Image (tube, grey):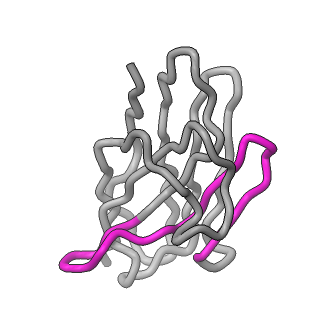
Amino acid sequence: QIQLVQSGGGSVQPGGSLRLSCAASLGTHTAACLGWFRQFEGKEREDVAAMGEDGKTWYTATGRFTISKEHANNTWYLQMNNLSPEDPALYYCAVDLFFNCGRWSGFLRRKDAWGQGTLGTVSS
């Protein structure tokens, strides 16, 4: 069974940081590409960052966001720094088990599983 479990998130003050986690249980599969997405209220989900199996990273956001992976526990992270009141959204991770990250219609060609979503808010 393929499963992504997210944790982290919460509320920070403007300029603060959050780190989101995405722990993957992939059975016999490996993640060809793991991506992070965000969804603003009333908007479509959009790409934020992705990491391929080769470790190459992809970003749409500015240098404030960093994707990383801890191989020992098959967990990916999204570090978000210098958060602003424009950043609050639902953040999701998703995995493509077959295709490396690239410039498809987004960074992932397929989304074989999604995390449950994590809310990140910024309040002064």
Residue at the farthest top position: 28
User: Quick one: 66 or 97, which is closer to the camera?
Assistant: 97
Q: Position of residue 75 (x, y in %)?
A: 57, 33
Residue visible at 71% across and 48% down?
Answer: 52
Residue at the farthest bottom position: 86
Residue visible at 58% across and 56% down?
Answer: 79
26 over 96 or under it: above or below: above
Q: Going by the image, does 30 lie left or right of 6?
A: right
User: Quick one: 57 or 9, which is closer to the camera?
Assistant: 57
Residue 42 lies in what quarter of the image? bottom left
Residue visible at 42% across and 71% down?
Answer: 46
Q: Position of residue 97 (x, y in %)?
A: 56, 37
**Where does the N terminus fall, quadrant-wise?**
top left
User: Quick one: 29 or 48, which is closer to the camera?
Assistant: 29
Residue 49 lies in what quarter of the image? bottom right
118 over 60 or under it: above or below: above
**Where does the C terminus fall, quadrant-wise?**
bottom left
* Residue 32 part of the magenta segment: no
Q: Position of residue 40 (x, y in %)?
A: 29, 75
Residue visible at 54% across and 44% down?
Answer: 96
92 over 12 or under it: above or below: above
Q: Going by the image, does 4 lie left or right of 121?
A: right
Instruction: Identify the magenta region.
Output: 38-60
User: Quick one: 97 or 64, which is closer to the camera?
Assistant: 97
